Image (cartoon, rainbow, N blue to C red):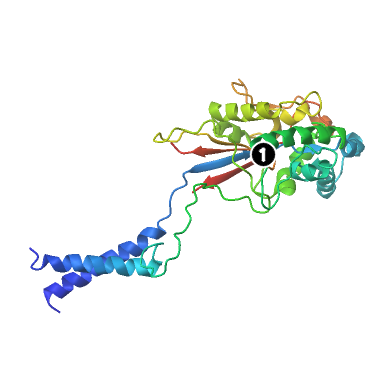
Amino acid sequence: MLRRPWMWAVGCLAGCLAGCQAQGAPSGFGEESGSPPAPVYVDDTPPDAGSPPAPRGPDAASPDAGELPKPPVSTGLQYNGAIGFDRRLP
Amino acid sequence: MNRGHLQFAVGSLLFAAAALAAPHAKAAPAGERVEISSPIFPKTSVLYAREGALFPATLAEEEAMAHDASLTFEPLLVSCQPMHPAITLATASSSPTPAELVTNYSEVAKCAYETYTAKPYWIPQLVSDVDICATELGPDWALPSEADLASFSEADFLFIADTLTGAATGTSNWGTFYFSLGIFVRGSDGSIQKGDLRPGAAVRVAPLPVTGDDLKRHYEGGLALRCIRRTPLE
């Protein structure tokens, strides 16, 4: 039986804060300036180095919001003439 | 140090360790991106001059010949654009729309045939001996293997076919081979074979109907030399 359970809580909080600072605080956390938050990239496709950016084609297979993604998620015809599609693990 | 201090220290240590370790956890790939390149077609004027008895005797000569003969899509976009003004080139600030990409594909198909004598007539021995995909498109591209085709689902084949069919709008006889679903494939036994990307195909990979010295002559079987690149998605 712990004699001072509140000390555990304080210890946990201190440890967590120390960990966050060591990693670099996430945007909006622990910053004093009014800098804007980091952008959120919704396209997880890395740009093709050395070639112009290929736009994402119409995504006919895209599921409605709330549904689990099903392969293939199309990206269609690319600028480099290739047919690209994402195969996500179910 | 009394018992309370010890509890405080242990609690701090555990949670600091957890906070440090969690962001470094390696996420398993969420899937992969598959890309099937547009065909690399040969300038027949180059191939016809070095086939049969005139086929190169060394790998270095084969590599030089394959490079001289190869027509790839992006250079064609640029070189064909003056003669085919419907082609839309990407700029630093803009990319073609999906409709413009379809037009680009059709116009390059025409241009490759009309201006550069491109036909789907690769010499199988050259495709077998030279890693044309890596040489012409980059080291992360490869000739599709029998295992690659076996890994595709029917939905994948349907998507590839639908995309090419959509891109074929407005194209007549010229350059139809740019839309071919018949491709060269590296068979499981290491030989060059013919692959079929059509949805519902009963046989995906089959041996070429030519053997021996005929492999050193251009093959008019309508096969496109397409390449594949598979990139893990994080």
Total count of labels: 1
The percent position of residue B169, horizontal first and vertical second, equals 71, 26
Q: Quadrant of residue B174?
A: top right
Q: Which chain does tag 1 point to? A: A
Residue placed under numbered mark 1 in the picture? A82
Residue at horizontal 87 percent and vertical 43 percent from the top: B56
Question: Which sits in the foreground, A1 or B164?
Answer: B164
Above or below B141: residue A26: below
Other residues around mark 1 within 10 Å, as few (<14) / some (14–19) / many (≥20): many
The percent position of residue A78, horizontal first and vertical second, equals 65, 40
The percent position of residue B66, horizontal first and vertical second, equals 81, 43
Quarter the N terminus of chain B occupies = bottom left
Q: Quadrant of residue B103?
A: top right
Please state if B157 lies on the left or on the right of B45 as rendered. left
Given the current orientation, which residue lies at the most extreme bottom position? Answer: B1
What amino acid is labelled 1 in the image?
Ala
The answer, for residue B11, to whether it is visible in the render is: no
